[in-house]
Amino acid sequence: MLIRVENQVRASDLVGCRYRLVQRHTHPEVPRTEAAQARADRYDAARSAVWENFPRKSDSRRIPFRRIDLGPIPAEDPWLRSLETLEALATGATHITGAVFANEKWLVGVDMLVREGASASNGSYTPVMVSTHRVARKHDKAKTLGVPTHRLGLSEPLELGYKPRHHVLDGYHLAMAARALDDLGLNSGRGVLIGQDRNLAFYTDTATYQPALDAALDAVELENLPTQPRRVKECASCRFWPLCKPELEAMDEISLFLPGDRARPYRERGIETVQGLIDASLGTPSQLAAAWRDGTVLLAHGDITVPRADVEIDVDMEAYMDQGAYLWGAWMDGTYYDFVTWEMLGSKAEARNFAEFWTWLMEQRDNAHAAGKTFAAYCYSAHGENHWMRMSAQRFHAHTPGVPSVEEVDAFINSGEWVDMFAHVKANFVGPFGLSLKTVAPQAGFHWEQGDFDGEESVNARRVAIGTDAAALTAREMLLTYNADDVQATLAVREWMSDNAPNTPRLSA
Ligand code: SF4
């Protein structure tokens, strides 16, 4: 028997913590967290933007077109919508938006169904899903079938130079829709995903997802659900954390210290509690468990080393999902420099903004060299910055003066003058709470003016900041303060490390 939560299992129930289903069943009254609500709002916004792009009419009499809009998703009454979906399919409509399929076990909303085949009597349907993920990435060699979103069902897909990126949740969505269509004898075997690039729709083979869907549905059968929580990454934003935390603490569950799979090697040795790991005297893991227990944030390996230079700049970039980088912030000699655009990303404004930042950064470097000084630009975990420097070069170099080529960016990234502080922190410390900037900088005495303004909130704030009203101006101010704090936090960590991280306990040999 499947556990029934708000009637049926959804695709989102098939990923992540399965104890969530148990908690939702037992405590349906617990409301969504603000973060989850914000995520849902973001998804709805992405979906509406794509729906605007769906075809509205045919440009040729030879291409039949009959679109039926059943309403937004999620549907207020999914059962009613599922009946309306069957009726719409029976009419042979070419495009059906807001479809829902439901059976006694599960339920799936489908952004659009596109009829394949010229005639209503022998047509099959392809489910189209909007995803908040990046569903394909440009690629020199790979080919994927795709079509502009506004031509879905009007043009045959073409081979595009993209490589698909698989996301489990998207796969489950499409597999459920395809399975429902299969039951009706209407499955085309294809599915379509529209990701962060809303203008392109990519085709995929839905049969490949079916075995994974079988396994996932099996895992949410009542007899297969866990009977107690285990801490995982998603606990941090889960509405049931206030209920699970005391349960975990009462058990002294090892996942409190080592969430997810990280505890597996110790469970295999029969260690299921934090105290068990401390008592096992396994060297660093046991010392870290003891540090976790008494709230010690960092343990140093020994004497600290960190690269320094005569001229130092701290850099931090803010991007909006897959669309572009809107803020390059830098801290030099006690001054914050912001290179920012609130205009559309992927535009000339973004190109000019990056050109200004790059030109300024290179000027500081050249001036340092000319004065016979050493130079270093620092960043904490440079993955995002490296990605957007390269992407900016790739997109804008050809037509925007001041934007470097990819080769110039790579030369800078690979030079010793671009320093990823996270790598140096990792080389010098271990910590039971991780080594994120938010965890490490307070040890160096730094505290964020913005409090708990995390990455997800910054994405939400950016959505507001592109407006022109008072709320937009407040959001801009918040984003700039957040960024200015991050660059100063990086500086604080570096200086504290230069002082040999005073008062930080050392790992015993
Ligand atoms: S708090 Fe964690 S363990 Fe509990 S239901 Fe949520 S994700 Fe699962």
Image (cartoon, rainbow, N blue to C red):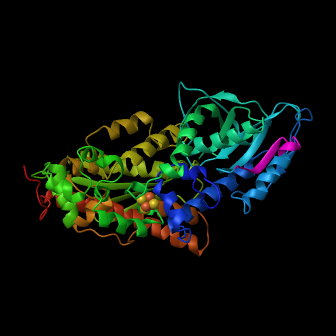
Near-viewer residue (485 or 458):
458
Image point 39% across, 52% down: which residue? Answer: 360
Left or right of residue 153, residue 226 in this image: left
Image point 83% across, 44% down: which residue? Answer: 89
Q: Is 75 placed above or below 123 here?
A: below
Kindly give the residue lying farthest to the top in the view shown. Answer: 141
Residue 461 appears in view:
no
Image point 59% across, 43% down: which residue? Answer: 172
Kindly give the residue lying farthest to the right in the view shown. Answer: 61
Q: Position of residue 381 (x, y in %)?
A: 33, 50
| Residue 100 on the magenta segment | yes
Q: Position of residue 234 (x, y in %)?
A: 43, 57
Q: What is the span of residues highlighted in magenta in the rendered image?
A: 89-103
Near-viewer residue (123 or 184):
184
Kindly give the residue lying farthest to the left in the view shown. Answer: 509
Ligand 1 - quadrant of the structure image: bottom left
Residue 276: quadrant of the picture? bottom left
Q: Position of residue 346 (x, y in %)?
A: 57, 47
Left or right of residue 178, residue 264 in this image: left
Image point 20% across, 54% down: which residue? Answer: 277
Near-viewer residue (366 or 153):
153
Q: Position of residue 155 (x, y in %)?
A: 78, 33
| Residue 224 on the magenta segment | no
